[in-house]
Image: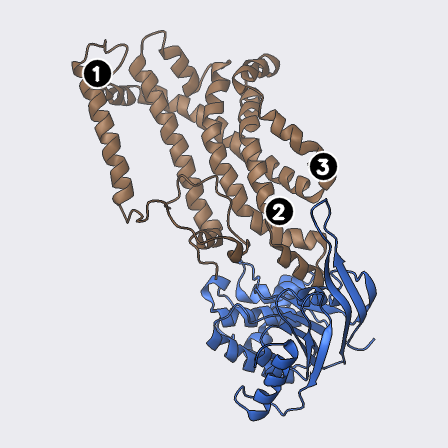
């Protein structure tokens, strides 16, 4: 998929092709085939090379800034420790995302179906996003203890919002003319929801989930920093004062790779489960 | 009630706020469609044709006058097929939304695919169908609604010229085989004359019927028939178009 950066774009399903000017990619020519990934890889390698040179030859203590090869070595030598802690964090993130996704989806449907609910709850939902999660995390740990509960609460709090917003948006995006047609087919409100709105909302759910996984990993780290005895966030926090910086970098690397993998998996699942959304993004609406 | 009766209908869209003036879409609109009759309504864009159809379908209420019509189903210009559903499921949607079980709805939709040259495309997604086929699927959906009145809103306007002509002949045949009361709104005078028993010409906004032409011609009709051409000229004249 070319659109890794286009997660925020609402799915184009069922919107009038007439109202949307055909997409023109910025810059005219679009990268073909492997050119895009290869370019990214080249930049990454160049950055790594510069880092390696600076860390090896520069004036900085390797304890303070480990070279990439030292990070790679830590990845290998600490693999058991890293893996054990990774499974803890990954479990928190996955469970948090699934819970937030399920609750968010149901929530979005409820907000969509009942205008009164939408009017009264939506502002609160937006307001909840202004809560500084870094400060709330230790408060939740104080309240809920060191277990899984505060982690799920924090990850859920962070991922809930994008899922609700994108799903709600997609639910409401169903073509007005299609709604009229459905009325003349004597479709009940529930039938419209089941046969038209819910399938139409799936691409929205995926957009939200893709945003959410990125936030969720960050949320998991905050949650672990606020109080825990395992997880990559916890390992990282312990590694710094011991000057195990290579291990700390390794933890960062693993968590980013994890977020990228989740994003990729969701993109893949989206292509398999809602291929029509992909069709219309390519401009094949007709 | 037999067919459709529109009597002295007025429909005004109120514009709220300081800047908006009210838009009178229809004023003194009259229309009759007997049961089984195909009535074409032609008029310039913005003359209230679509509003008329929505009134007939009960999607809007008139501000004055009366609309009495048998239950009507709308077939809009865009096919509005659901992109995730197969062609068969799209047609069967008309039954599904009324609570018919999936298997039964599909079985009832299937024979129409045979009749309308869609056999073999039951499982195709809309994106894989041509414009003409999509419109035929939409027409099956419309028929499966089981309403005596079909309100067709420029059903072929989005198609290219060649496909449009094919679809007009196809619809003429389909309606002969499956008679319904039809109100067909179009801005294509030729389409109106080829398809309809009667052509009603509307004035620009506020829309009302200014002329009525009986099309007592045998079917199938062709756009090149002398009688079709003559009627087309008369309709264009009534529309106020330069000949």
User: Which chain is in blue here?
Assistant: B
Does label 1 or label 2 sit earlier along the sequence? 1
Residue A115 coordinates in the image, percent (x, y): 72, 41
Secondary structure found at label 2: loop
- Disc 1 to disc 2, how far (Cα)? 53 Å
**Which residue is disc 3 drawn over?**
A117
Q: Residue B149 at what x, y percent from top left? A: 72, 73
- Which chain is represented by brown in the image? A
On the same chain, marks 1 and 3? The answer is yes
Position in image of residue B6 (x %, y %): 79, 72
Q: Quadrant of residue A238?
A: top left
Residue at far front of view: B242
Label 1 neighbourhood size at 10 Å, few (<14), some (14-19), many (20+)?
many
Residue positioned 52% across, 57% down in the render: A18
Upstream in the sequence, badge 3 or badge 2? 3
Image location of residue A27, percent across then percent down:
33, 45
Which residue is denoted by mark 2 in the rendering?
Answer: A172
Q: Nearer the viewer, residue A50 or B26?
A: B26
Instruction: Provide the chain ID for the residue under circle 2.
Output: A
Which disc, if any, is residue B4? none
Q: How is the image coloured?
A: by chain
């Amino acid at each position: 998929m070319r659109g890794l950066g286009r997660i925020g774009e609402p799915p184009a399903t069922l919107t009038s092709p007439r109202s949307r000017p055909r997409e023109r990619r910025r810059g005219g020519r679009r990268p073909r085939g492997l050119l895009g990934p290869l370019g990214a890889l080249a930049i990454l390698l160049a950055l790594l090379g510069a880092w390696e040179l600076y860390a090896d030859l520069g004036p900085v203590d390797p304890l303070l800034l480990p070279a990439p090869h030292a990070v790679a070595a830590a990845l290998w030598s600490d693999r058991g420790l890293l893996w054990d802690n990774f499974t803890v964090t990954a479990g928190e993130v996955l469970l948090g995302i699934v819970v937030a996704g399920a609750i968010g989806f149901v929530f979005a449907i409820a907000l969509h179906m009942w205008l009164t609910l939408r009017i009264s709850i939506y502002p609160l939902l937006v307001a909840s996003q202004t809560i500084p999660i870094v400060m709330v995390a230790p408060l939740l740990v104080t309240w809920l203890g060191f277990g899984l509960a505060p982690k799920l609460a924090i990850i859920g709090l962070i991922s809930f919002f994008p899922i609700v917003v994108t799903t709600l948006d997609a639910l409401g995006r169903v073509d007005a003319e299609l709604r009229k047609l459905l009325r003349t087919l004597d479709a009940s409100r529930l039938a419209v929801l089941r046969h038209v709105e819910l399938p139409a909302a799936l691409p929205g759910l995926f957009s939200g989930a893709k945003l959410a996984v990125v936030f969720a990993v960050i949320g998991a780290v905050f949650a672990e920093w606020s109080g825990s005895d395992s997880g990559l966030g916890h390992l990282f926090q312990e590694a710094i004062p011991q000057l195990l910086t290579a291990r700390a970098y390794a933890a960062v690397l693993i968590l980013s790779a994890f977020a990228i993998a989740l994003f990729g998996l969701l993109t893949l699942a989206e292509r398999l489960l809602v291929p029509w959304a992909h069709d219309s993004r390519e401009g094949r609406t007709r | 009630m037999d067919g459709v009766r529109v009597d002295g209908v007025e429909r005004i869209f109120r514009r709220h706020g300081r800047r908006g003036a009210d838009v009178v879409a229809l004023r003194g609109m009259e229309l009759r469609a007997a049961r089984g009759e195909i009535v074409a309504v032609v008029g310039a864009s913005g003359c209230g044709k679509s509003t008329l159809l929505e009134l007939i379908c009960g999607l809007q209420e008139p501000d004055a006058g009366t609309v009495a019509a048998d239950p009507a189903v709308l077939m809009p210009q865009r096919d509005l097929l659901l992109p995730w559903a197969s062609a068969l499921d799209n047609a069967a949607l008309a039954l599904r939304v009324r609570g018919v079980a999936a298997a039964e709805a599909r079985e009832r939709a299937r024979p129409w695919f045979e009749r309308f040259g869609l056999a073999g495309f039951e499982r195709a997604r809309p994106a894989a169908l041509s414009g003409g086929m999509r419109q035929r699927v939409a027409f099956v959906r419309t028929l499966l609604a089981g309403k005596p009145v079909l309100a067709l809103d420029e059903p072929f306007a989005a198609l290219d010229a060649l496909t449009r002509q094919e679809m007009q002949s196809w619809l003429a045949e389909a309606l002969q085989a499956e008679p319904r009361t039809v109100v067909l709104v179009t801005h294509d005078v030729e389409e109106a004359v080829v398809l309809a028993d009667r052509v009603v010409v509307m004035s620009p906004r506020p829309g009302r019927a200014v002329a009525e032409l009986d099309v007592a011609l045998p079917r199938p009709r062709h756009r090149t028939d002398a009688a079709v051409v003559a009627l087309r000229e008369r309709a264009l004249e009534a529309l106020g178009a330069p000949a």
